[in-house]
Image (cartoon, helix red, strand yellow):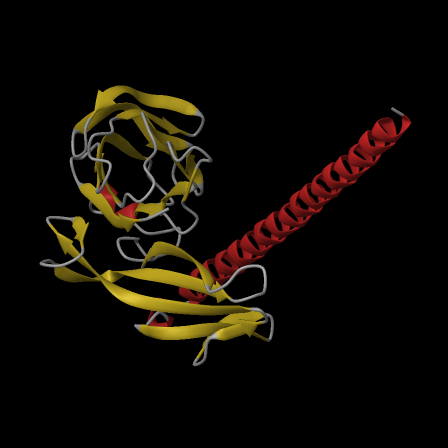
């Protein structure tokens, strides 16, 4: 009987050791898996930031002159504190960044992949960041954005013009246009009246957009006041509560134009109708 008990105890010991070994290996596997997952997440975060920097660099280059944005494959470099395109891709080990600038085609105002006419005032910027590490093999992320020649459609002049038509003295500035965080509002546009003597007034507005054609515009707010509210589809002309721009006024904000859903990927055209029925159109607005 003693021998039987002793034998059973040895079996128990062997089983216990085996169980502890299995549990220990499982714990190590979970820890290593967690470390690898954390490393992958960190690589993704760094690569995304690197790609966003490329987009911001090309935006800066665009702002210094539309002629600087030409088709091709590039990197970017900082020259005397300003961004400039470079002939080779950017390498910041383990990451490689390639920036591509390409033409954009439009058909009836909408951006299309083929079958349209090239829009000389719009370019598509694509930034690809790739990397290859022990944790993540042959991975990449791609960000893209449409850039427009925001000076098109803007009255170039200084305060003091005397205008035959009110629209001749209206500036619609779109250089700083952005989306709100939820992509439902266009922000950053401002209005100028270049006539130093006379007030001009906007009475109607038409907003047309590509993509998200099922969305509806719900609010136009200018200088902190709702000038129109409702629900209309793309291209509908709406009547504003009269928006007066005093003589010589500048940077009057279009506080926001709001929609009932995300407008990510849309390109906008805005036409303002003035009190004298003249119109000013700004197209290719791509936040």
Residue that extends furthest to the bottom in the rendered view of this protein: 87
Residue at 51%, 54% in the rendered image: 48
Residue 113 lies, with reference to residue 228, above or below; the image says below
Q: Is residue 77 visible?
A: no
Quadrant in the picture for residue 26: top right
What percent of the width, then of the height, locates residue 166?
Answer: 24, 41
Residue 119 lies, with reference to residue 190, above or below; the image says below
Q: 277 or 20: nearer the eye?
A: 20
Residue at 19%, 33% in the rendered image: 234
Residue that extends furthest to the top in the rendered view of this protein: 230
Residue that extends furthest to the right in the rendered view of this protein: 2
Q: 245 or 28: nearer the eye?
A: 28
What percent of the width, then of the height, locates residue 73?
Answer: 36, 74
Residue that extends furthest to the front in the rendered view of this protein: 1
Residue 150 lies, with reference to residue 213, above or below; the image says below
Residue 133 lies, with reference to residue 243, above or below; the image says below
Residue at 44%, 66% in the rendered image: 61
Residue at 83%, 33% in the rendered image: 7
> Where does the N terminus fall, quadrant-wise?
top right
Quadrant in the picture for residue 252: top left
What percent of the width, then of the height, locates residue 110?
Answer: 17, 48
**As drawn, is 9 to the left or to the right of 113?**
right
What percent of the width, then of the height, locates residue 164?
Answer: 20, 47
**As drawn, is 273 to the left or to the right of 3?**
left
Q: Is residue 114 visible?
A: yes
Q: 4 or 60: nearer the eye?
A: 4
In this rendering, the count of numbered labels is 0
């Amino acid at each position: 009987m003693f021998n039987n008990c002793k034998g059973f105890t040895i079996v128990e010991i062997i089983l216990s050791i085996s169980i502890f070994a299995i549990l220990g290996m499982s714990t190590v596997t979970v820890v290593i898996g967690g470390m690898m997952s954390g490393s992958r997440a960190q690589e993704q975060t760094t690569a995304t930031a690197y790609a966003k920097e490329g987009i911001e660099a090309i935006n800066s280059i665009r702002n210094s002159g539309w002629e600087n944005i030409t088709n091709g494959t590039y990197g970017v470099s900082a020259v005397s504190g300003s961004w400039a395109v470079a002939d080779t891709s950017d390498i910041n080990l383990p990451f490689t960044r390639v920036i591509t600038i390409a033409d954009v085609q439009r058909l009836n105002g909408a951006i299309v992949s083929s079958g349209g006419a090239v829009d000389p005032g719009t370019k598509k910027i694509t930034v690809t960041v790739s990397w290859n590490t022990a944790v993540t093999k042959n991975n990449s992320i791609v960000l893209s954005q449409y850039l427009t020649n925001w000076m098109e459609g803007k009255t170039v002049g200084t305060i003091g013009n005397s205008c035959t038509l009110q629209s001749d003295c209206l500036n619609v500035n779109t250089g700083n246009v952005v989306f709100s965080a939820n992509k439902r509002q266009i922000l950053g546009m401002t209005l100028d009246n270049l006539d130093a003597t006379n007030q001009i007034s906007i009475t109607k507005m038409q907003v047309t957009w590509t993509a998200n054609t099922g969305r509806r515009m719900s609010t136009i707010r200018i200088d902190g006041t709702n000038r129109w509210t409702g629900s209309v589809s793309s291209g509908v002309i709406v009547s504003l509560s009269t928006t007066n721009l005093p003589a010589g006024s500048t940077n009057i904000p279009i506080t926001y134009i709001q929609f009932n859903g995300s407008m990510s990927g849309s390109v906008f055209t805005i036409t303002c109708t003035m009190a004298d029925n003249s119109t000013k159109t700004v197209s290719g607005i791509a936040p």
